[in-house]
């Protein structure tokens, strides 16, 4: 699989959300995001920028209720897009580990693009929300993405006292780890597993 093929388009329509999403893994960090939640848009744009992914997201969700379905369903679509875009995962590096600081906050992500969904989160957020975004939904975002992309992923918010910084450090660590893990290793032409598939 050439790197130019690593793209996906996902649509999802439920009674709670209508979503159109496109992803190019080998992008320039360009994004066009509209979820109706300003801080979430900011985080998805930051994710694209720091992971060098091209990302478009349009979500019309039930924000009159809360932000849960919008955050979760976009994460599901993004996970499905990664899974689709990576295909048989031939030639990828597979593993990555990133720690990212943002002022007083530090977050880390360890990932294995294994095809085996597993997720653990450690840490907490210093404030309940950032704008219209509920802070704990950052944890739920990563969980939903990991499960739908088939990632084994351990995420930690190590320290911080500002939820904006804690959430943003987490999104950036996720972006950098996924960028590293999905990169093509020029030394490898096969799938990085003794089983022969991921």
Image: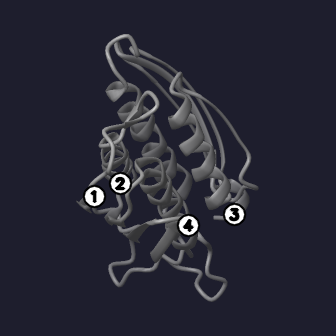
Secondary structure state at the residue bearing disc 3: helix
- Using the image as rendered, state which of residue 134 and residue 53 is in the foreground: 134
115 relative to 184 in the view: left or right: left
- The picture quadrant where one finds residue 12 is top left
Q: Are the residues tagged 2 and 4 within 8 Å (C-beta)?
A: no
Spatial distance from mark 1 to mark 2, Cα to Cα?
Answer: 6 Å
Spatial distance from mark 2 to mark 4, Cα to Cα?
Answer: 15 Å
103 relative to 53 in the view: left or right: left
Q: Are the residues tagged 3 and 1 within 8 Å (C-beta)?
A: no
Counting residues from the start of the chain, the first of labels 2 and 4 encountered is 2
Question: According to the image, label 1 marks what residue?
Answer: 117
Q: Is residue 144 above or below residue 58?
A: below
Counting residues from the start of the chain, the first of labels 1 and 4 encountered is 1
Q: Position of residue 7 (x, y in %)?
A: 63, 48
* Count of numbered labels shown in the rendering: 4
- Using the image as rendered, state which of residue 67 and residue 13 is in the foreground: 67
Label 1: how many residues lie within 10 Å, few (<14), some (14-19) or many (20+)? some
Question: According to the image, label 4 marks what residue?
Answer: 176
Secondary structure state at the residue bearing disc 4: helix
Q: Is residue 102 above or below residue 57?
A: below
Q: Can residue 112 be seen at all in this image of the molecule?
A: no
Spatial distance from mark 2 to mark 3, Cα to Cα?
Answer: 22 Å
Q: Residue at x 63, y 44 (%)?
A: 45
Camera-near label (1 vs 4) is 4
Counting residues from the start of the chain, the first of labels 2 and 3 encountered is 3
- The circle on residue 146 is 2
Q: Residue at x 47, y 66 (%)?
A: 104
Q: Position of residue 49 (x, y in %)?
A: 67, 54
- The picture quadrant where one finds residue 9 is top right
Q: Are the residues tagged 1 and 2 within 8 Å (C-beta)?
A: yes
Question: According to the image, label 3 marks what residue?
Answer: 3
């Amino acid at each position: 699989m050439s790197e130019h093929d690593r793209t996906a388009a996902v649509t999802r329509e439920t009674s709670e959300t209508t979503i159109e999403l496109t992803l190019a893994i080998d992008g320039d960090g360009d994004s066009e995001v509209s979820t109706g939640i300003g801080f979430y848009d900011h985080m998805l744009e930051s994710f694209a920028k720091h992971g060098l992914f091209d990302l478009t997201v349009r979500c019309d969700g039930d924000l009159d209720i809360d932000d849960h379905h919008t955050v979760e369903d976009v994460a599901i679509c993004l996970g499905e897009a990664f899974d689709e875009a990576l295909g048989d995962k031939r030639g990828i590096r597979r593993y990555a580990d990133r720690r990212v600081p943002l002022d007083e906050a530090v977050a880390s992500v360890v990932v294995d693009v294994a095809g085996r969904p597993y997720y653990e989160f450690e840490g907490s957020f210093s404030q309940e929300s950032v704008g219209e975004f509920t802070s704990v939904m950052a944890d739920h975002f990563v969980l939903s993405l990991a499960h739908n992309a088939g990632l084994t992923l351990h995420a930690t918010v190590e320290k911080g006292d500002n939820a904006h910084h804690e959430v943003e450090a987490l999104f950036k660590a996720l972006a950098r780890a996924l960028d590293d893990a999905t990169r093509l290793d020029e030394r490898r032409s096969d799938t990085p597993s003794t089983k022969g598939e991921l």
